[in-house]
Amino acid sequence: MLDAGERKLVAAALAAREHAHAPWSRFKVGAAARFGTRIVQGCNIEFDVYGLTNCAERTAIFAAFAGGFAHAPLTAIAVIADTDEPVCPCGACRQVMFECGGPDLRVILANLRGDVSIVRMRDLLPGGFRLGRQAPRKPPSRARKTRA
């Protein structure tokens, strides 16, 4: 079922879950993303203004960008929580995961009971949205007028 690398990824997600800051929901989630050979952990973080919270999956991916590890491809991500079935990412996380890992990204869903489900990103977000990979658009030129 899980190979050694995938078991290591789930273990890293489980360890990251211990750092979750979930004072309101008490729903702790851990994630671990593999960028090349590097594993980057993330946990969910809640704040009083609930819209400012961040999910574990996005925290792991954002940490990879902040740490300079996202130059390598995102090849797998594991997420774990205390749920009846293996936990599944929310829509916002699915979009970020799709953009970073593409439709073939391997997603390992797990719970604390040891249940695991492995899916591809295309199964979690069919027809996922991606802008064309083009150079960023330059803002309009604002030439300064000088007085002669």
Image (tube, rainbow, N blue to C red):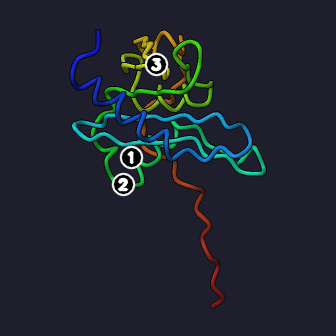
Residue 67, which numbered label? 2
Residue 83, which numbered label? none
On screen, 60 above or below 112? below
Regarding mark 2 in the picture, which secondary structure is present there? loop
| Front of the two marks 3 and 2 | 3
Residue sitting nearer the eye, 33 or 145: 33
Residue sitting nearer the eye, 9 or 36: 9
The amino acid sitting under disc 3 is: Leu
- The Cα–Cα distance between marks 3 and 2, rounded to whole angstroms, is 24 Å
Position of the C terminus by quadrant: bottom right
Q: Earlier in the sequence, mark 3 or mark 2?
A: 2
Provide the residue designation for mark 1: 64
- How would you rate the neighbour count of disc 3 (Cα within 10 Å): few for under 14, some for 14-19, many for 20 or more? many
The amino acid sitting under disc 1 is: Ala
Position of the N terminus by quadrant: top left
Provide the residue designation for mark 3: 109
- Lateral position of residue 46 relative to residue 69, left or right: right
Regarding mark 3 in the picture, which secondary structure is present there? strand
Regarding mark 1 in the picture, which secondary structure is present there? helix
The answer to the question of whether label 1 and label 2 lie on touching residues, with beta carbons closer than 8 A, is yes
| Front of the two marks 1 and 3 | 3
- The Cα–Cα distance between marks 1 and 3, rounded to whole angstroms, is 20 Å
Q: Residue furthest front?
A: 113
- How would you rate the neighbour count of disc 1 (Cα within 10 Å): few for under 14, some for 14-19, many for 20 or more? many
The residue depicted at 46 percent of the width and 12 percent of the height is 122
- Residue 7: x and y in percent read 29, 24
On screen, 95 above or below 54? above
- Residue 102: x and y in percent read 40, 23
- Residue 19: x and y in percent read 50, 47
The residue depicted at 57 percent of the width and 55 percent of the height is 139
